[in-house]
Amino acid sequence: MARISFSGQELPVGLDIGQNQIRAVQLKRVNNELVLHDFGVIPLPEGATNDGEIVATAAVSEALRTLWRERKFTGKIVATGVANQQIIFRMIEFPWTEEKSLREALLLQVQDYIPIPVEDAIIDFAITGEKLNAEGERVYELMIAAVQRDGIDKIVDAVQDAGLKLARIDLTPLALVRSVLGDPKRVHYDEFFAEPETVAVIHISSGVTNLAIVEAGVPRFVRFLPTGGHDLTIKLSEELEISIDEAEKLKRDLGLPALDGSVPPLMNYDAQLVFNAQSILEREVSHYINELRLSFEFYQSQSPSSPEITKIYATGSGMQLVNFTSYLEASLRADVDIIDPFASIQVSDSLQQYLGMERYSYAPAIGLAIGGR
């Protein structure tokens, strides 16, 4: 039985099982540099996953087998992630004890911190620091995670039925942080952040959003939002009564109206259609950004001494929506940097030509391949 892990074997194939597709990345370490060996994506049939959870293990297994036939991955060892609303993530203070006894001691008390029965959960933890608490007692700062056991079992079954070997299961939002910050074996957190600040890291895919809030280089909060770029396409299709393909093209061509009121060429679209489409996009994006704001506010309520989030590092296909970055900055009062997850990875010319704008969709898979500290 696999368990959630914050560390593990290096450089298996990073496997991001998403809402509509599976993305995989294999990296190799050459002279202490990360080199892209191969990458690939394969669509999933509708209903194979739902809100980040595998529903049809056979369909996922078949997709994995096909992906391995089509790509040049060496070996069958993989690392995958879990990202759904069943994730329970806590930062806690725990009485100091010898590290060799810490897991046993934590498991005896962990029910106090999670809302599901311990016997139904897969639980793991990582030490993020030590300090003296308000009473002067020595305590650990622990990052603990728990997910429903049956969800993990489905991941294990899907991977193993495809003939692959599972090295570890990680939390996808934490893998995302590693991808954005770079390989922790080469890049120190204090070199990435200009100063100890609190930042948000988000990955917006077609179907879901992963969010992590990082304080002074340490992940303090993770959240999964079952909303992504494809939801905008569906709304356009439904309300304008056009096909999904037509709606996707319309979304990509028009994007959001500019906040400064400037109007680009209409690209032969009818002015009324442009107004209707952008009104729908603006409304739905407003709802989406409000979900992010509520997540930020919840984090702040749990950590009132933490500074406000003034920086957002973003990846994912959803960031390609025209003018979306300016809406995020204006609504959340934070600077937004779009991060290329391949920026610190050596990519050959033969592979570089195939990445294109899809490169931003591979951040979770890269983080899963890199692995934890």
Image (cartoon, rainbow, N blue to C red):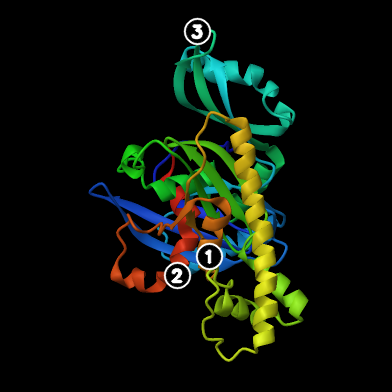
Q: Amino acid at mark 2?
A: Met
Residue found at the far top of this picture: 136
Q: Amino acid at mark 1?
A: Ser
Tell me the quadrant of the picture where the C terminus can be found.
top left
**How far across and how far down the image is residue 117, in percent?**
74, 28
The residue pinned by badge 1 equals: 317
- Which residue is at 71% across, 41% downward? 150
Q: Check disc 2: other Cα within 10 Å, few if <14, some if 14-19, many if 20+.
A: few
Q: Check disc 3: other Cα within 10 Å, few if <14, some if 14-19, many if 20+.
A: few
- Among numbered discs 1 and 2, the one appearing first in the sequence: 1
Residue 250 seen = yes
The residue pinned by badge 3 equals: 136
The image quarter in which residue 56 lies? bottom right
Distance in Å between CA atoms under marks 2 and 3: 52 Å
Q: Tell me: residue 143, above or below residue 243.
A: above
Residue 52 seen = no
Q: Amino acid at mark 3?
A: Gly
Q: Nearer the viewer, mark 3 or mark 1?
A: 3
**How far across and how far down the image is residue 333, in percent?**
53, 51
**How far across and how far down the image is residue 106, in percent?**
59, 19
Whether pointer 2 and pointer 3 mark residues with C-beta atoms closer than 8 Å, the reply is: no
Whether pointer 1 and pointer 2 mark residues with C-beta atoms closer than 8 Å, the reply is: yes
Residue found at the far left of this picture: 31
- Which residue is at 66% across, 70% downward? 281
